[in-house]
Amino acid sequence: MFHVTVFGATEGVLPLSDFVSLTVFGGTELVRPTLAQRMLRLKEIRNRPQNFWRRVFQLDKNIIVTVFGGTEIHAPTVMDEYADLRRVLSSGALSAEEGKKLLAEIAEKGGSHDLFSALTLFGGCTVERPKPAVEKKALEAGRQAGLIGDREQSVLEQVVGRSESAVAGVLGQLCFSPA
């Protein structure tokens, strides 16, 4: 799939793969998939035979090209990350053991290196975390909706504004460790 922005601004969702974004003299905002979605994608990639050319040219990743413009990739809130990981685990799509390994691998690499490659000329391409106020509002809404308890809320509040690796570590503790 192609996403082209020339002399303008667009927004959309960054898929897990097979996506090319070209931004020239403009701005593009993309919402990044959750860690749980990325873990499922990593599992899928591992379970299929590796093609030499796909591995060498990293064709399993998205490609983001920015020339004289800006591309912002917005990370999901901590609440979205937690809720999606719990959903994937409860569906049985990932076992706890698989989940631990995949989450640790994504956290170890740090950033979104499993998701996209970027080429930027005279512009910028950044991954933006949600603002603390947005994160806290989402956590409070999750608690009020019964998705998380007071304990989970206080633990998740500790990683607001921290790196993706820190978020992954806390999610691993909450989802894979006995209470």
Image: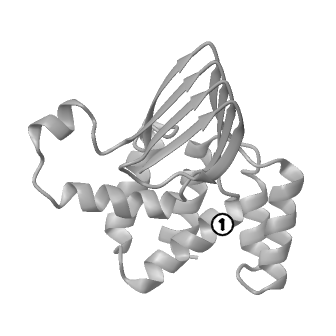
Q: Residue at x 53, y 51 (%)?
A: 14
Can residue 63 be seen here? The reply is yes
Q: Residue at x 36, y 56 (%)?
A: 102
Can residue 177 be seen here? The reply is no
Q: Position of residue 146 (x, y in %)?
A: 75, 87
Along the viewing direction, whichever of 168 and 39 lies nearer the viewer = 39
Way the structure is coloured: one colour
Query: Splitting the image into 4 quarters, where does residue 68 fall?
Result: top right
Q: Is residue 174 above or below residue 68?
A: below
Left-right relation of 27 to 175: right
Q: How many marks?
A: 1
SS for tag 1? helix
Query: Splitting the image into 4 quarters, where does residue 170 fall?
Result: bottom right
Q: Residues within 10 Å of mark 1 (few under 14, many from 20)?
A: some
Q: Is residue 55 above or below residue 166?
A: above
Q: Residue at x 62, y 53 (%)?
A: 12
Q: Position of residue 151 (x, y in %)?
A: 75, 73
Along the viewing direction, whichever of 101 and 60 lies nearer the viewer = 60
Q: Quadrant of the C terminus?
A: bottom right
Q: Residue at x 83, y 47 (%)?
A: 131
Q: Position of residue 89 (x, y in %)?
A: 45, 77
Tag 1: amino acid: Asp
Residue most extreme to the top: 122
Left-right relation of 112 to 8: left
Query: Splitting the image into 4 quarters, where does residue 73 fall?
Result: top right
Q: Position of residue 81 (x, y in %)?
A: 61, 63
Q: Label 1 belongs to which residue?
A: 80
Residue most extreme to the front: 7
Left-right relation of 140 to 73: right
Q: Is residue 172 above or below residue 64?
A: below
Left-right relation of 98 to 110: left
